[in-house]
Image (tube, rainbow, N blue to C red):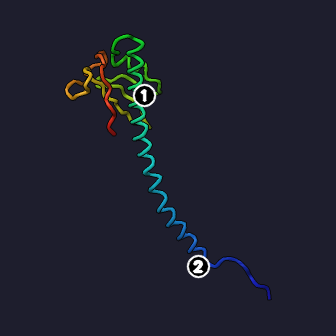
């Protein structure tokens, strides 16, 4: 009489259940990373706009307009908007706010692409 070897149905079901539990634990962690990556990209782009502002001031010897500032940002999907520099991050547009005064206070936001930018605010995502 030959002895058959292999897995029983119960053993296979238990392995599938364990893999399902591990997957249920791991998937939410990866989903949350996508949001964190978008937030980090937005903050990084805010820093890039601030750096471009400093370079534009040094290059132009005066404060740049919103349009000029957008040309100094070295990234794809960057354009000038009335209230700041708009950047495309993962298919969604995010605007880094710009101001006409050096204190970056509310009420002094740029309102046209030709406005002079004296301050670039930190992007709050």
Q: Position of residue 40 (x, y in %)?
A: 42, 40
Q: In the rendered image of this protein, does residue 16 appear above or below residue 4? A: above
Q: Are marks 1 and 2 in contact (CB under 8 Å)?
A: no
Quadrant in the rendering for residue 38: top left
Position of the C terminus by quadrant? top left
Q: Residue furthest right?
A: 1
Figure label count? 2
Name the residue located 35 percent from the left edge and 15 percent from the top edge. Answer: 64
Q: Badge 2 is on which residue?
A: 10
Q: Closer to the camera, 90 or 64?
A: 64
Q: Along the polypeptide, which appears first: circle 1 or circle 2?
A: 2
**73 left or right of 17?**
left
Q: Position of residue 80 (x, y in %)?
A: 36, 22
Of circles 1 and 2, the one toward us is 1
Name the residue located 31 percent from the left edge and 19 percent from the top edge. Answer: 117
Q: Badge 1 is on which residue?
A: 48
């Amino acid at each position: 009489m030959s002895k058959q070897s292999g897995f029983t149905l119960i053993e296979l079901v238990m392995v599938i259940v364990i893999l399902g539990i591990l997957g249920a634990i791991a998937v939410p962690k990866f989903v949350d990373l996508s949001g964190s990556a978008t937030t980090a990209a937005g903050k990084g782009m805010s820093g890039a706009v601030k750096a471009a502002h400093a370079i534009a001031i040094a290059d132009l010897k005066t404060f740049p307009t919103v349009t000029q500032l957008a040309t100094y940002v070295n990234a794809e999907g960057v354009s000038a908007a009335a209230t700041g520099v708009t950047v495309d991050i993962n298919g969604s547009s995010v605007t880094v706010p710009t101001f006409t005064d050096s204190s970056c206070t509310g009420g002094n936001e740029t309102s046209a692409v030709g406005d002079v930018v004296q301050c670039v605010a930190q992007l709050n995502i």
